[in-house]
Image (cartoon, rainbow, N blue to C red):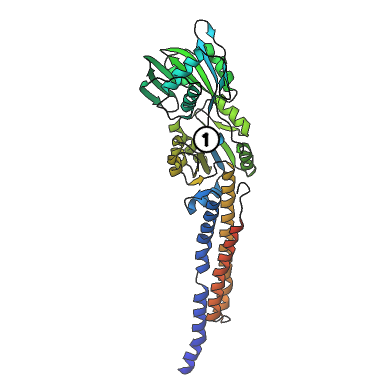
Amino acid sequence: MTAFFAGLTPAFVSAVAVLVIACPCALGLATPTAVMVGTGKGAEHGILIKGAEHLQAMREVDTVVLDKTGTITKGEPQVTDVTAFNTIQGSLPVVKVNRGRQIGGGAEEELIRLMASAEQASEHPLGQALIKEAKKRNLPLSEARDYSAVPGHGIRAEVEGKVVYVGSKQWIERQQVDISAHVGQIEALEKEGKSILLAAIDGQLAGCAAVADTVKETSAQAVHELQAMGIEVVMMTGDNRRTAEAIAAKVGIEHVLAEVLPERKADEVANLKRQKQKVAMVGDGINDAPALATADVGIAIGTGTDVAIEAADITLMRGDLLSIVDSIQLSRATMRKIKQNLGWAFIYNVALIPVAAVGLLSPILAGAAMAMSSVSVVANTLLLNRWRPRHGS
């Protein structure tokens, strides 16, 4: 009997050693430690990631959809041209605005005054540009009554007893207003990358204002780097196609989704996803929120609205598109660390379990090896702290 138990002792010791070696501590640490360090490094450099799944999803993105206003451009539109149409004598000269100084006056100033008065209740950037221009010219604004707005189209209001419509060509045409005599003039401004706001007063086409937004200095570089990474870049905007394509050409984007109404943005993103694409949507406005929520990864510009930031999975505090490149690179670096950690932990278990099973490893040494495996995984993860974005701080 004594000999029997004496024979059991080595087997028991080996079994204990196997149990210790088989403990998956290192496997359990491999992913969460890397995610923790990765999200921390992102926050350190202005990339706020809401969860581990979003960090992982960024690595798989192959299509980035960019909103135009406030994302590709600075979101600070300014009135550049004003034209009052005289339906009897033809059109009056264009008024150029240069650093706040207007050339001309009369009909054009009255046009701006009425358009700005009608837009006072609007929060749209183009409407705010009209108001800013009227104030720059020291024009008195009148109260707007019976204001109504159709997102993506335009507004209607009563100003000084006049019914004023301000908005896109389609919006003005829907009011049964003939714009055919001035289409060439309007299209010429659109080809310059300007957004055109038409105004109809009491059923007659009164004139138009051209509004331009400056492209961010880093937008073209960001688009180029995303394309170099094998990622398709798409621009989506509610603007007309000529204006959209002019802006897209400045930054090197070929795929343009133009004249997309706010309620259709999410549908366009969903359509890209149905084509088996992993889509990241980048926007900053309230109208972008549904599309941000629909995308595989929603990315909000930190200078945007609270609604967009709340709907997004990642927030870029720097506000420029190069942060998108940095976030993808951070995601890829983090996923590489996770794979390295899992690979090391798996090799450790596979290699040492047989050694422990044949009695070549005592439980004490097995425990030390298990601890060293966990320490090595954590140490490898901490090397991620050496990651630095290629752009910014």
Q: Which residue lies furthest to the top in this view?
A: 88
Query: Visible in this render: residue 171?
Result: no
Residue that carries the numbered disc 1 in the rendered image = 70
Residue 376, image x, y percentages: 58, 68
Identify the residue shown where x is 51% and y is 64%: 29
Q: In which quarter of the image is the N terminus?
A: bottom left
Query: Visible in this render: residue 163?
Result: yes
Residue 133 drawn above or below residue 85: below
Residue 68, image x, y percentages: 53, 33
Task: Sort mark 1 into few (<14), some (14-19) or many (20+) by Cα contacts within 10 Å.
Answer: many
Identify the residue shown where x is 42% and y is 18%: 165
Identify the residue shown where x is 54% and y is 69%: 374
Residue 241, image x, y percentages: 55, 26
Given residues 32 and 205, the one toward you in this image is 205
Q: Which residue lies furthest to the bottom in this view?
A: 2
Residue 70 drawn above or below residue 134: below
Given residues 155 and 134, the one toward you in this image is 134
Residue 47, image x, y percentages: 53, 48
Describe the element under mark 1 as helix, strand or loop: helix
Given residues 129 and 152, the one toward you in this image is 129
